[in-house]
Image (tube, rainbow, N blue to C red):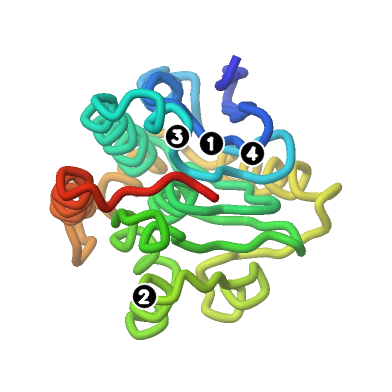
């Protein structure tokens, strides 16, 4: 199973799609449903989003697309739904990131309310090397504008420590301590008045300077265009 959700006041949603947590179209939709259901449950106060295995998320399963190019539309819809579900979740979402956080992983972390990361975690968008675009909307929530542009053009990555210096990663821990740190933070939020926290989430989304749904949808149009032009490439 790619997505495992453990409900409760702190709902834990775990991605587990070996070997690298690259999700299929169905996996992205499954993740979106899990996050939406967590937010809709009045018992949920916080969501912790994390992963098992080698890294947090490696984006889209390009092998699936290589096997069936027609799935591009469904993959785009799945990614859009998952990123939107994290952003629009009625309660705060804490992303606990370890290892690689690439492509769609940046979309998830960038739309989360708070990001914690392990010492070896790194973030990046390899899309240009794959002949695609996307998730710069979310990367721009993690790094300054000029660094975001350099990362898109060159496909370079940034470390958890660099993001901690920017303030976009709240805390850097050891890999073994990451889950406990996420739950400690979630517990502090869950102890607050749940109705106040839900209104706080709604109000903070309402004052965001960028409409992340519209911005990301605009990016997706170029990904689809590049695919039609035959520019999309699988991983080497």
* Residue 39 seen in the figure: no
Is 176 on the left or on the right of 2, as rendered?
right
Spatial distance from mark 1 to mark 2, Cα to Cα? 22 Å
Q: Farthest bottom residue?
A: 146
How far apart marks 1 and 3 lie (CA) works out to 33 Å
| Label 1: how many Cα within 10 Å (few below 14, some 14–19, many 20+) | many
Which residue is tagged 2? 153
Q: Is residue 155 above or below residue 180?
A: below
Front: mark 2 or 3:
2
- The 10 Å Cα crowd at callout 3, few under 14, some 14 to 19, many 20 or more, is some
The x, y position of residue 206, in whole percent, is 20, 53
Q: Please say if 185 is above or below 172.
A: above
Check if mark 1's residue and mark 2's residue have beta carbons within 8 Å.
no
Q: Are marks 4 and 1 in contact (CB under 8 Å)?
A: yes
Residue pictured at 57% horizontal, 72% vertical: 158
223 or 8, which lies in front?
223
Q: In screen coordinates, is 65 left or right of 187? A: left
User: Crowding near pointer 4: few (<14 within 10 Å), some, many (20+)?
Assistant: many
Q: Secondary structure at mark 1?
A: strand
Question: Residue 175: which numbered mark, if any?
Answer: none
Q: Earlier in the sequence, mark 2 or mark 3?
A: 2
Residue at screen point 24% across, 25% down:
70
- Mark 3 lies on residue: 194
> Which residue in the structure is indicated by mark 4?
20
| Residue appearing at x 46%, y 60% in the figure | 126
Residue 102 position in % (x across, y down) = 51, 53
* Mark 2 and mark 3: Cα distance apart in space: 42 Å
Residue that mark 1 sits on: 22
């Amino acid at each position: 199973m790619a997505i495992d959700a453990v409900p409760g006041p702190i709902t834990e949603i775990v991605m587990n799609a070996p070997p690298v947590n690259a999700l299929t179209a169905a996996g992205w939709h499954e993740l979106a449903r899990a996050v939406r259901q967590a937010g809709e449950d009045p018992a949920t106060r916080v969501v912790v989003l994390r992963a098992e295995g080698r890294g947090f998320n490696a984006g889209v399963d390009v092998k699936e697309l290589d096997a069936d190019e027609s799935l591009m539309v469904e993959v785009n819809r799945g990614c859009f739904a998952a990123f939107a579900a994290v952003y629009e979740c009625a309660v705060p979402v804490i992303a606990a990131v370890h290892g690689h956080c690439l492509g769609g992983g940046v979309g998830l972390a960038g739309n989360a309310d708070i990001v914690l990361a392990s010492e070896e975690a790194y973030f990046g968008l390899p899309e240009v090397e794959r002949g695609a675009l996307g998730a710069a909307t979310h990367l721009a929530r993690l790094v300054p504008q000029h660094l975001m542009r350099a990362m898109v053009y060159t496909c370079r990555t940034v470390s958890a420590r660099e993001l901690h210096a920017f303030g976009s990663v709240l805390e850097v821990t050891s890999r073994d301590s990451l889950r406990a740190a996420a739950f400690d933070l979630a517990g502090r939020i869950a102890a607050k008045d749940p109705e106040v926290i839900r209104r706080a989430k709604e109000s903070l989304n309402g004052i965001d300077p960028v409409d992340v749904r519209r911005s990301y949808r605009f990016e997706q149009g170029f990904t689809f265009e590049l695919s039609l032009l035959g520019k999309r490439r699988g991983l080497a």
